[in-house]
Image (cartoon, rainbow, N blue to C red):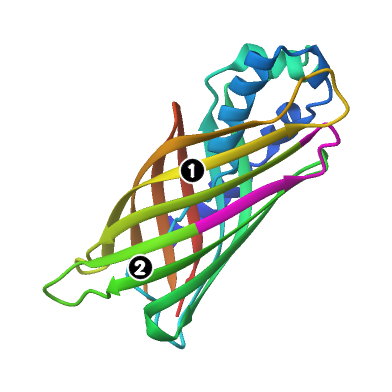
Amino acid sequence: MRLASASLIALLGAIAPIAQAADLNMLQSLSQSEFRLLSEDLGAIVSFKPLIPSEPLGLTGFDIGIGVSGTAIENRGVWQKAAGGTSVPSTIMVPSLRAHKGLPFDIDLGVSVSRVPTAGITITGGELRWAPLAGNAALPAIALRASASSISGVDQLKLRTYGFDVSVSKGFLFATPYAGLGTVNVSSKPEASSLKGKEDFNLAKAFAGVNINFGLANLAFEADKTGKATSYSAKYGFRF
């Protein structure tokens, strides 16, 4: 539990750098190709991060926690231009509140809400996950996930993502590693700017992680590559 507490402090401490990069108020200064690059980075940041193994929670199961994701942006110069010349960190940190609930027929429902401090940006996301193979002592769990996410609070931009992936996990004592492959559709539309129209495209997604159980409390760590951008995430929560 001492490790879990230290990790929680680290998660909360990572929130501070977010506001510097969030104020995207100069999209009219971008070319259409630059807007596409910005949208690719945003799609990787906003796309739903599982942070949970493939095995279903069961009808009475819950998984509730706080998380933080850090995405290394690929097009930092474009971000600085879109932010009116403001200095932008190389990694965008996003904290989140997350909850999953087990449903009948090995289906789980998950939601997440992220608020970028002082910048007025909210990211909302959700997933519906079904495990055709629930897993047991001998066999891994295999799950199919459909997810969606969107941002609000940016006057000049509307962006949403839809994702689909297949994942597998297998528990070993107190640790459950998992991994998955999928695709993310990104729809990014500029508002009130000189840009000619929205960008709509798909990004390949691959992720892997591990959930570590401490009884009631648990930690999850995950690496994600969506398009060209790499994200690292962690979650501290309670699974029961």
Q: Decide if residue 34 is on the left or right side of residue 103.
A: right
| Mark closer to the chain start, 2 or 1 | 1
Does the image show residue 89? Answer: no
In this rendered view, identify the residue nearer to me: 156 or 195.
Answer: 195
In this rendered view, identify the residue nearer to me: 89 or 146.
Answer: 146
In this rendered view, identify the residue nearer to me: 10 or 199.
Answer: 199
Query: In the rendered image, which quarter contains the N terminus?
Result: bottom left
Query: In the rendered image, which quarter contains the C terminus?
Result: bottom left
Residue 194, image x and y in percent? Answer: 84, 17
The residue at 33%/71% (across/down) is 131
Checking the image for residue 86, the label placed there is none
The residue at 71%/45% (across/down) is 151
Residue range highlighted in magenta? 147-157
Pointer 2: what residue?
213
Residue 60 is inside the magenta segment: no
Residue 25, image x and y in percent? Answer: 84, 25
In this rendered view, identify the residue nearer to me: 183 or 80.
Answer: 183
Q: Decide if residue 156 is on the left or right side of residue 138.
A: right
Checking the image for residue 184, the label placed there is 1
Which element carries disc 1, helix, strand or loop? Answer: strand
